[in-house]
Amino acid sequence: MPRFIVVLGSIMSGLGKGILSASIGKVLQARGFSVAPIKFDGYLNVDCGTMNPFRHGEVFVLADGTEVDMDFGTYERFLGLNLNKRASLTGGKIFQRIIEKERKGDYLGRDVQFVPHVTDYIKTYVKDYAKDLNADFVLIEVGGTVGDIENSYFIEAMRQLSLEEEVLFIQLTYLPDLYGELKTKPTQHASKMLLGMGIQPNIIITRSDKPIDATVREKLRTYCNVEHVFNDTELKTVYELPLRLEAEGLWKAIQNYFSLPEKSADLSKWADRLRALEERQETKTIAIVGKYTKQIDSYASLREALHISSTEVPFNIRIKYVEAENVERDTSPLHDADGIIVPGGFGNRGVEGKIKAIEYARKNHIPYLGICFGMQLMVVEYARNVLGLDACSEELGKCADPVIILQPEQEGVKQMGGTLRLGDYEMEVKPGTILSEIYEGREAVERHRHRYEVNPTYVGKLEEQGLIVSAYHKGLVEAVEYDRQKWGFGIGLQAHPEFTAKFEKPSPVFTRFLKEVGKWTKQ
């Protein structure tokens, strides 16, 4: 019989409900329980695919091709899972389904309302999800903040769910520091708001800049009517949080609430990986050249994939976000880089700066990794500056040599959401290439999110001049790499290998890239 844990946020957004939910799941996994995360997002988009990374952070892609909120990357990295589209429930999906049912006549004779129709749909969805996955625990993250209009009906559905199933409510809150004193009054008011919605939190977890003392804990217990108050203070890395929650006694609170037998946790492998990040003497700088650098959560999975793979090398990494438009005028922001990455992206802005960064990496033999758009621009740069072609991508305009073109199956596509080439695709890796060393074989699977591809007409010319195509999928170019003897280490993947990195299973692409960074020395 599944048990449900609902995580709600109060006071302010951006507290890290996704990291907390994933960490709770890790504490349970460490005791042998199966967990299934699910997240509700209140926006009326059906999915995240059409959202601007500046406003929402990165768009994460699941194995089945669903475009979702960045918290799903956190779930997968922490829990080692590959989730599917059912784990993401948005306001847009809910209302789309309700209206479909109304048009079909499923509600004939009734005026369709939030209660019971919307709330019943949500409850049934969550229960079916738990049943089909046969999970011991379903972790439900409620997006937004308590008091928001857009999540109020979902919170009501969770209240109703608690009358029918075993549900534990966890309130994540923020304690502001005013002149050295952590203030509890905002959390008290937020708890009263939840009570007004019919929900009594069972556990309060506080975010604060410094550890809370016994006085603060007692205030919150007394005035918020809860037995358990735990602290989520600032940590060196988010991956410390499962160990912090374990030390705080979260398991004991969950165990008592659900009347579970005692189970010891095995977080030794997790702790070993954390220790691998400690006591490094050397630091290497990785420059990420992109157009969304003012909102670094646009590159959340890329950042985390690098940090995870840094447990495999004997040095720290410093990630330096470089605005691509600035590189158009001046490459000096790259002069301290030990490795350069151009990530995925869309549109013209900053393109020439990205191309210049790729050229700088190639000519100076700096280890280079191109991801999706970064791979396509690697081809454009090579075609321009080595082959001497008037090269470009069709996505960006017209030229004599369109080395990047629209995929044939994308011709005539009108809708923007969910119509890219999305999700897991298999790559046939060419033997004897750097990529075959990385994947230790001839096949690999990575996730994709793109419309354009390398123009096959130019593949022969590119390879003749030292740009090797190292992987295909049914005729589509999946990866390219430099002739190492000419240009040093440089690879580009049409896929997004950052989406498959797990804390306990680093991406081999990023691990190899960092190992090459470790071997590279400035000329």
Image: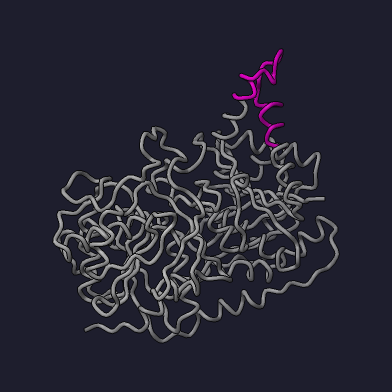
Relative side of 45 to 118, left or right: left
297 or 174, which is in the foreground? 297
Question: x and y percent of residue 250 in the render?
Answer: 71, 63
Number of numbered discs overlaid on the protein picture: 0
Q: Position of residue 457 (x, y in %)?
A: 27, 53
Residue 196 drawn at (x, y percent): 68, 36
Instruction: Give the answer, above or below, for where 60 lies relative to 230.
Output: above
Q: Quadrant of residue 334?
A: bottom left
Residue 480 can be seen, yes or no: yes
**Picture quadrant where residue 479 is located:** bottom left
Hey, which quadrant is residue 34 in on the image?
bottom right
Observer-nearest of 370 and 115:
370
| Left or right relative to 407: residue 17 | right
Q: Quadrant of the C terminus?
A: bottom left
Residue 225 shows up from this direction = no
Which secondary structure is most common in the magenta stretch? helix
- Taking depth in this image into account, of 449 and 216 the one nearest to the observer is 449
Question: Which residue shows up at 31% across the image and 54% down it?
Answer: 456
Closer-to-camera residue (128/259): 128
Residue 522 on image: x %, y %: 25, 82
Is the residue 227 above or below the residue 286 in the image? Answer: above
How is this picture coloured?
one colour
Residue span colored magenta: 100-123
Residue at x-position 76% and y-position 52%: 134
Horizontal side, residue 3 vs residue 16: left or right: right
Seen as rendered, the residue at the extreme top is: 109
In reply to whether residue 321 is colored magenta, the answer given is: no
